[in-house]
Structure formats: C-alpha cells, structure tokens
Amino acid sequence: MARAWIQDRWLRGTEKTLADGTVVRIDPPAGAKRSLAMNIDHPERANVPDEFRTSEFGRGRRWMVFWQADEGRKRRSFKDYQSAEAFRASIEDDIRSGKYVNPKDLERTFGDVADLWRQTLTGTIKGATESRYVRELRVWVLPRWGKVPLGRITTGSIQTWVAQLAEGKAPYAGRRGTPRPLAPKSIRSIVTIVMGAVLKFAVESGWMQHNPMGKVKMPRMTVAQPRVYLVPAEIKAIADGMSEADATVVYVLAYTGIRIGEAFALRCGDVDFDARTLAITKTQSVDREGHITETLPKGNRSRRVPIPSSLMPRLGELVRECDDGGYLFRAPRGGANNTQNWRVRTWFPALRAAGMDEIPGLVIHSLRHTYASIAIKSGADVKTVQKVMGHASAAETLDTYADLWPDRTGDVAAAVDRDIIM
C-alpha cells in the first residue's frame, strides 16, 4: 500500500455511458493537458472542456501530495508535477526507513526549540556552565537563528555565520559594546557546543531528520599563550604588595596547588593542623543567574591537600578568632571573598606594584601551575600530582604539564643499548 500519493487538483476524469449501456472512464485528453501546461500561470486561458475541470480548477497550486503518518493524513501542495513527485518519493522513503519528520515540525523556530532545550539544563550541569551557555545563546546564537525555522538551517548557512563570528560581523545582543572578532575557542563553544546542543535536541525530539552541524568546519585553534611558572622570589614579590591575609592566599595557591575558587570556599575547620592538610570539599562558583554560590569541586571530587609546614603559622593566625564554619579567607567586611573582586582590588594592584603586570599570560591560575612545576621538579610522580591537584586522570595531568617532566628518551636509549649483543 502506497504511503504517499499525488492528486491533480484541477483536472479529473469523467464517465461516459456507451450505446450498449457500458460505463467507461475517460481521462482528460492530452491536448487539454498540454494547453493547461502552457498556461499554468493563467489556467483560465487553457482549452480544457468543463467536464474535465474540478471545482477547484485554477485555484491554488495544482498538485497535492498526500501521505499517511502516525499523526494522521498529511498533505502539501506544489505548483509543478516534478516537485510533487520528488517530494512524494522522499516522504515515502523517509516513512519506510523510519526517518520521517512531520514537515510542520521543521517550521518550529530555533528560538522555540532553544527555550525547551534550556529547561533540560537545570540540575544536569553546574550553574556556572549553565550561565555561560545561556549567555552565549542570548548574545550570539539567538540574534542570528532565533526566528529561523529548523527546516531552513543548513550546513552552508551555519558555515557563513562561523565566518561572521571570526570577522566580528555576526549579529550581537550583548548589553555592552559592539560585535568583535571572536577567538576560535569562543566560536567552538558558541557554535559547536551551544547551537549544536539545541540542534541535537531537535533531532532527538524527532523534529529534524539530521543535524546540519555535523559537517561545519571550525576555525583552527591559534597557538596558546605560554603558561607562566613563577619562581619563589616572584611569588614573594606579588605577596609583598598585599595585606598579610591576602598574601597568605597567594602562598597557599602557589604552594598547595588548589584553585582560587576552592581557596575562597575553605572554612577554618577545613584546616587540619595535626595532619597538615586542607580538606577541599567545595568550590566557589556562580549559579545560572550569575550569583555567587558554592558547589562540589571540579569533577565532583573532594580531596585532601598537604600543607607545607612553612605555611602553618600563617594559617594559624587566620583561624585564631574563627570558628570551624567561618571562612578561612574572609572579605574585608567579613564573609566570603569574591574571586572577581579580589582579582581587581588585590591581584592586579599587587602585580603593578611588583612590576609584573606586563608579563603575558600571568594570571591567578599561574600560581597553580607554579605548584605543579615545583612538585614535578622535586621528583613527584604523575599519580601524586594528579591526586593533589584534583585532576580527573593521570592522562589529564600529563597532557597539562607534559612540558615539565624531563625528557628521558636518552635514558631509554642507553638502557636498551646495554642489552644489545652484536
């Protein structure tokens, strides 16, 4: 049984009774069909006898494709037979192969689908990540695609948009400033991750047959800025431009390897003076609305970090008048420090005072990298560094700090050489 068929809305066959009483069906004559084809834009001029004209003759599009789907009988009209036949064959193949998509679903706008996708995020990813996705969706994706039907989103149109993002010519809805050329990493996040996730959601919901993002090419990643490793004298120079409490933040970051968000989430009770360890059980983050909050550390992994004995007196001063639930590194007016505020009010002025504000790539996270460099230089193995720094795997540690481990290929060659018999 056919799943799709074509109907001529303008012409019809008629019946004629012969002399012997036999009823025969007569199709529209070839001449009438040719005349109508020649006057398709003005059917009233065509030489078509009235008995072969339907009640809809000359109105709307001539050809109608019908098909039967789960949601009932559907139809779509076409001006010419070739287009109708191509659509009929396509829709029938889709139904047969299980790839069928209701054409009305392809008329859903990207913005409508994005709203539904956003509702799936809450509780499934960290608030900070959700906030970033929502911001990129609002600022970059929806201005270009919000009103576009799913069926009109193609690989080519996405590729054009990628070029506009790279050139600073893409539609923009930021609350401040104007569009600017984006780095490859930012484009990948906006296009592949955010827009790609919405399109994937549409495919999985059965509203699109395939994801046009699949063959879109992203800009090549540029050479990353060199990672900065500080020496002890440089760490001290930065700390000397701060208060004692803020200097302790710098020393803890540089000599324990914890992240700045983890440091500002520490409570006084997280310091174990007997074991000389810090309990890293939470980190400072932001929720979907951009408000400061606390979550589990990165990768949802808590850990204990050893504290060098030289730091113990400094930490002892901080906890002297603090109960276990109080913040270890308190803001000037009490309560939790804010990473962004601390960076602007404390970190940047200290860099300027130390004459280090022009060093390319020097950021707060450089203190964590510095810890890794010291640990590896001291002979720490990869598993130990991984455990202390809270990496998901040893592979992540090696990928991040491969440049710090000594090149021992010569040692391997020497060891092999000792076993050679010739």
Image (cartoon, helix red, strand yellow):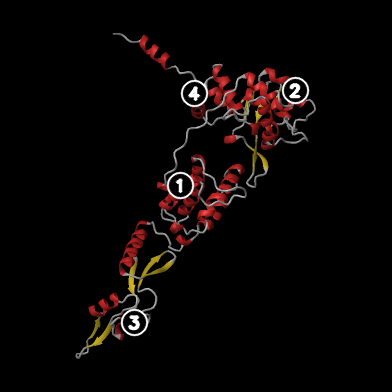
Q: Are there few (<14), some (14-19), or many (20+) residues within 10 Å of tag 2?
A: few
Image point 21% across, 88% down: which residue?
A: 18
| Sequence order check, earlier mark of 1 and 2 | 1
Q: Is residue 265 visible?
A: no
Q: Identity of the amino acid at label 2?
A: Gly
State the image coordinates of residue 68 (x, y, percent, origin top left): 38, 67
Vertical placement of residue 35 versus 222, above or below: below
Q: CA distance from mark 4 to mark 1?
A: 33 Å
Which residue is disc 1 drawn over?
Answer: 163
Q: Are marks 4 and 1 in contact (CB under 8 Å)?
A: no
Image point 67% across, 44% down: which residue?
A: 291
Q: CA distance from mark 3 to mark 4?
A: 80 Å
| Sequence order check, earlier mark of 1 and 3 | 3
Which residue is disc 3 drawn over?
Answer: 44
Seen as rendered, the residue at the extreme left is 20
Q: Secondary structure at mark 3?
A: helix
Q: Secondary structure at mark 2?
A: helix
Q: Nearer the viewer, residue 171 or 293?
A: 171
Q: Identity of the amino acid at label 1?
A: Ala
Q: Identity of the amino acid at label 3?
A: Glu
Q: CA distance from mark 2 to mark 3?
A: 97 Å
Left/right of residue 389 with respect to residue 2 in the rendered view: right
Seen as rendered, the residue at the extreme right is 321
Q: CA distance from mark 2 to mark 4?
A: 36 Å
- Point out the frontmost of discs 3 and 4: 3
Q: Are marks 1 and 2 in contact (CB under 8 Å)?
A: no
Which residue is disc 2 drawn over?
Answer: 316
Q: State which quadrant residue 412 falls in.
A: top left
* Mark linked to residue 403: 4
- Point out the frontmost of discs 2 and 4: 4
- Point out the frontmost of discs 1 and 2: 1
